[in-house]
């Protein structure tokens, strides 16, 4: 009994089946000449594709950190408000009653009501406020670092998707041209202009193009699944057929000689170290339990014949001895502080190297895109010359197949180079700590 696939997986397999159907010639008649990579977006009935920034916001809204962030903020703000109070903890109500009613019932009565007020240790209140503020700051910087990490994953998946779409379009164009050439060779074989060996070469070229198209369809499916794993199924559903790289490129940032100190990854580690320091300072202060101020009122009498007497009691409870738990807590906080500071140094060096690499890659990708575009234009013109020459019988089939393959490969590399130049801009923004 066949199992029904989930809708997302079924749609993905449907797209793969359609692409492989095209490679087998099931999508209708082939075109006479393969289409070039368009330089302007095609008009279509689909809604415009989401920009990388819109896709990022959609992906971030589905992250666990984003959904839990409001509650984490509420918790940090609650600790901040608690640290601003005059008492170390909530007051406690003490009630007591003493009577002789159960034994001799001579009228002895003793009623007591009091309050226990926990007091701050010296400097504990100020350090608790500092710790609460550091927690809130560290929470926001940690969320910013999480957003940057998500941006890196999204950028990688986004450009892999764009490259896979471009490769599939080139593979489709190449297969269309190879199929058309195989038909022309078959006609000329029947006319006696070409041999059976020529037909086999043309059919082999068509089979190779078909295999390349099938592989391109698989790579696109894998890239789409990577985006779907980030919760971007809507972006995939509303994607137009093709867009120019410039329509997808992020704004190019200004080159930076040094790494910005407000980089989210560095801020998160710096705030984490500051939080550990505040925690260690508070642990050093909380070496013993909090003292308590006790205020009580007593109403008592010795017998039925005596009237009730009222008294007020003021007491102070002072814990003695240091707490072993506070020493462990202080050591743990100091270890976290040292660890965060070491990670901050390592991360700074790694980000600086990443920034240098991204700047060099951006420069190289721009030069590579220009060179690849020029080569594609020259080989496209050469392909046109040899197509006419082969049609007139002035050149042989192996030369025509070689020129055909070189022209499409140059076209594929040129299209990829344009997208890789746009990808290099994203990589530079990621290295600088900028979101889409």
Image (spheres, rainbow, N blue to C red):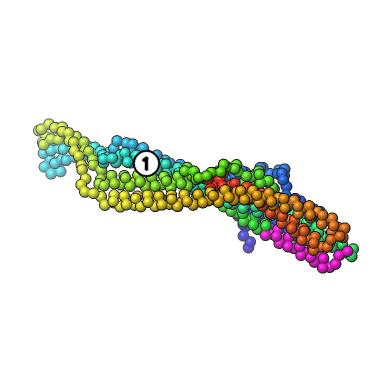
Q: Position of residue 254 (x, y in %)?
A: 57, 41
Q: Nearer the viewer, residue 183 or 269?
A: 269
Q: Is residue 209 magenta?
A: yes
Q: Nearer the viewer, residue 368 or 191?
A: 368
Classify residue 136 as left or right of residue 352. Answer: left
- Whether residue 133 is visible to the viewer of this picture, yes or no, is yes
Residue shown at the point (70%, 44%) measured from the top left: 41
Q: Image quadrant for the N terminus?
A: bottom right
- Where disc 1 sits, the SS reads helix
Q: What segment is highlighted magenta in the picture?
A: 193-215
Q: Nearer the viewer, residue 202 or 416?
A: 416
Residue furthest out toward the bottom: 197
Q: Image quadrant for the C terminus?
A: top right
In the picture, residue 292 is in which quadrant? top left
Kindly report the secondary structure that dominates the magenta region of the rendered protein.
Answer: helix
Residue identifier under label 1: 132
Q: Position of residue 333 (x, y in %)?
A: 35, 50
Classify residue 24 as left or right of residue 113. Answer: right
Residue furthest out toward the front: 257
Q: Position of residue 278 (x, y in %)?
A: 35, 44
Classify residue 163 as left or right of residue 101. Answer: right
Residue shown at the point (80%, 66%) measured from the top left: 200
Q: Is residue 211 magenta?
A: yes
């Amino acid at each position: 009994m066949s199992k029904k696939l989930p809708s997302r997986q079924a749609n993905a397999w449907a797209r793969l089946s359609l692409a492989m159907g095209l490679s087998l010639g099931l999508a209708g008649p082939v075109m006479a000449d393969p289409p070039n990579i368009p330089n302007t977006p095609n008009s279509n009935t689909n809604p415009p594709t989401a920009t990388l920034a819109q896709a990022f916001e959609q992906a971030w809204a589905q992250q666990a950190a984003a959904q839990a962030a409001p509650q984490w903020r509420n918790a940090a703000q609650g600790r901040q408000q608690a640290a601003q109070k005059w008492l170390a903890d909530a007051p406690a109500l003490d009630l007591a009653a003493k009577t002789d009613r159960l034994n001799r019932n001579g009228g002895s009565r003793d009623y007591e009501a009091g309050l226990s007020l926990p007091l701050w240790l010296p400097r504990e209140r100020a350090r608790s406020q500092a710790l609460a503020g550091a927690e809130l700051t560290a929470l926001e910087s940690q969320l910013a670092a999480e957003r940057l990490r998500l941006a890196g994953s999204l950028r990688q998946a986004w450009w892999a998707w764009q490259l896979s779409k471009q490769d599939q379009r080139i593979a489709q164009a190449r297969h269309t041209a190879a199929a058309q050439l195989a038909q022309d060779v078959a006609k000329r074989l029947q006319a006696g202009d070409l041999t059976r060996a020529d037909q086999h070469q043309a059919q082999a070229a068509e089979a190779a193009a078909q295999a390349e198209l099938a592989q391109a369809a698989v790579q696109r499916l894998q890239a789409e699944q990577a985006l779907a794993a980030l919760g971007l199924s809507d972006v995939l559903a509303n994607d137009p057929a093709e867009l120019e790289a410039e329509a997808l490129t992020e704004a190019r940032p200004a080159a930076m000689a040094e790494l910005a100190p407000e980089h989210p990854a560095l801020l998160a580690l710096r705030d984490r170290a500051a939080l550990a320091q505040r925690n260690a300072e508070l642990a050093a202060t909380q070496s013993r339990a909090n003292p308590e101020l006790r205020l009580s009122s007593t109403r008592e009498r010795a017998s039925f014949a005596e009237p009730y007497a009222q008294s007020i009691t003021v007491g102070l409870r002072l814990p003695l001895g240091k707490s072993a738990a506070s020493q462990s807590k202080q050591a743990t906080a100091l270890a976290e502080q040292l660890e965060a500071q070491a990670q901050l140094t390592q991360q700074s060096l790694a980000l600086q190297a990443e920034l240098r690499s991204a700047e060099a890659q951006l420069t190289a990708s721009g030069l590579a895109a220009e060179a690849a575009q020029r080569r594609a234009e020259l080989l496209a013109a050469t392909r046109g010359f040899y197509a006419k020459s082969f049609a007139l019988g002035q050149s042989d089939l192996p030369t025509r197949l070689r020129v055909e393959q070189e022209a499409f490969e140059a076209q594929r590399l040129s299209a990829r180079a344009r997208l890789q130049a746009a990808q290099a801009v994203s990589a530079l923004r990621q290295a600088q700590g900028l979101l889409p």
